[in-house]
Image: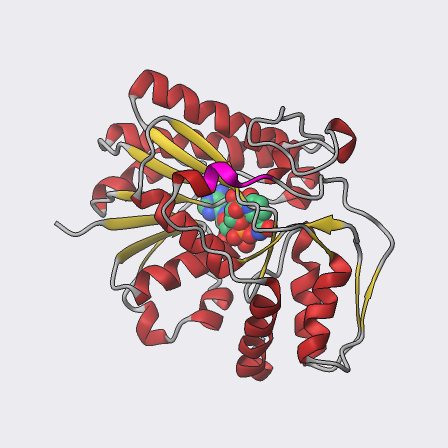
């Protein structure tokens, strides 16, 4: 029987792209999200394409509802993305822990109850502490994780949960740790401002990105495809990978990529480096997967601008 993919958080940015890629490749997808707001999905798919997807409204904190979606839709592949991002965890830590930590436990419990042997889930480079924790250069695959945000602490907890479910239940998992994701649909969260800047630039409006510094940018469409691959290719054990994506670049480089396409863009960058290391070594990811999706920055920014232009007043 053909696989059925469960995407949690499919109304979000990476999730909407995951659903889009699944639909485009003719794969059956079920979205589990507490939100019924399809604005990101509407930017990516026609109503006809959306009709191929099963939308199940539900709260990840509800253990029985999560188990039910696995059972009722014969789920065989899992891409667990739903979470509350940094600002939301900071604003309401207990809720952040319920969604991000208990919600992830619920996914593993549902997998156990339904005989699912493998899960792909979103971790984050937020599991790492500030640059002062590390020697210069790219951060190693096995660098110590000492997050300084609750969001990062919850993600570390999830990686621990994944390890225990592997050792005690034999459920393998692949956690991917994105850095700064950009692209159509990236409209909330701490590092969404570069994408907001592209939308403003297309509309001819000035925009100030509130942070600077050196980092790795990843195109949402690429990240989503890597999650699909992670769900399809169990690697054995509880694995975690930094997404990396080539040489680190500055926020100013991102703006320069936008100005190559839109020379009149008025994008300014505040002098406020983010407290994260500049870049992460992704050699383990490359060694483990046959394919790493990594659209070069200039191309990804140009593609995103073209997409925003096509959406016109719709974005
Ligand atoms: N975007 C990034 O730059 C980035 C970087 C690192 C890690 N990540 C991780 O990747 C994943 C996806 O990120 P994103 O940018 O698509 O997030 P997003 O904020 O755009 O979407 C998250 C989705 O989760 C859903 N959700 C929240 N609480 C829920 C609940 N209780 N029950 C069901 N659904 C719920 C929301 O409705 C939303 O649709 C997250 O786990 C995030 O932590 C993202």
The answer to whether residue 14 is magenta is no
Q: Residue furthest top?
A: 168
Residue in the foreground of this view, choosing between 151 and 177: 177
Above/below status of 8 relative to 136: below
Q: Position of residue 239 (x, y in %)?
A: 43, 31
Quadrant where the C terminus sits is bottom right
Q: Quadrant of residue 25?
A: bottom left
Residue at left 16%, top 52%? 2
Residue 225 relative to residue 186: left or right: left
Residue at left 72%, top 29%? 134
Residue 83 relative to residue 80: left or right: right
Residue in the foreground of this view, choosing between 148 and 73: 148
Q: Quadrant of residue 162?
A: top left
Q: Position of residue 153 (x, y in %)?
A: 62, 29
Q: Quadrant of residue 183?
A: bottom right
Above/below status of 221 relative to 121: below
Residue 92 relative to residue 162: left or right: right
Magenta-drawn segment: 281-285
Residue in the foreground of this view, choosing between 102 and 123: 123
What colour scheme has been applied to the protein in the rendered image?
A: secondary structure
Q: Main secondary structure of the magenta part?
A: helix
The answer to whether residue 284 is magenta is yes
Residue at left 41%, top 19%? 164
Above/below status of 143 relative to 178: above
């Amino acid at each position: 029987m053909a696989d059925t993919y469960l995407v949690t958080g499919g109304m979000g940015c990476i999730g909407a792209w995951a659903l889009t890629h699944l639909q485009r490749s003719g794969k059956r997808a079920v979205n589990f999200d507490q939100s019924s707001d399809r604005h990101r999905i509407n930017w990516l798919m026609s109503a006809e394409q959306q009709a191929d997807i099963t939308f199940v409204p539900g709260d990840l904190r509800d253990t029985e509802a999560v188990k039910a979606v696995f059972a009722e839709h014969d789920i065989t592949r899992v891409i667990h993305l739903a979470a509350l991002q940094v600002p939301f965890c900071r604003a309401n830590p207990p809720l952040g822990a319920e969604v991000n930590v208990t919600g992830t436990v619920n996914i593993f419990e549902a997998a156990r109850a339904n005989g699912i042997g493998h899960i792909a889930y979103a971790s984050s480079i937020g599991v790492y502490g500030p640059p002062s924790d590390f020697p210069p250069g790219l951060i190693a695959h096995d660098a110590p994780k000492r997050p300084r945000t609750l969001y990062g602490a919850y993600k570390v907890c999830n990686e621990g949960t994944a390890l225990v479910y592997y050792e005690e239940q034999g459920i393998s998992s692949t956690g991917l740790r994105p850095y700064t994701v950009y692209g159509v649909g990236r409209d909330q969260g701490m590092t969404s401002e570069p994408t907001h800047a592209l939308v403003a630039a297309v509309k001819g409006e000035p925009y100030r990105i509130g942070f600077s510094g050196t980092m790795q940018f990843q195109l949402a469409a690429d990240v989503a495809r890597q999650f699909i691959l992670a769900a399809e290719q169990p690697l054995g054990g509880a694995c975690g990978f930094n997404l990396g994506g080539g040489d680190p670049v500055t926020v100013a480089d991102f703006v320069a990529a936008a100005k190559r396409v839109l020379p009149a863009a008025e994008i300014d960058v505040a002098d406020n480096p983010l407290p994260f290391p500049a870049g992460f070594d992704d050699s383990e990811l490359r060694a483990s997967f046959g394919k790493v999706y990594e659209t070069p920055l200039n191309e990804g920014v140009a593609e995103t601008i073209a997409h925003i232009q096509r959406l016109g007043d719709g974005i």
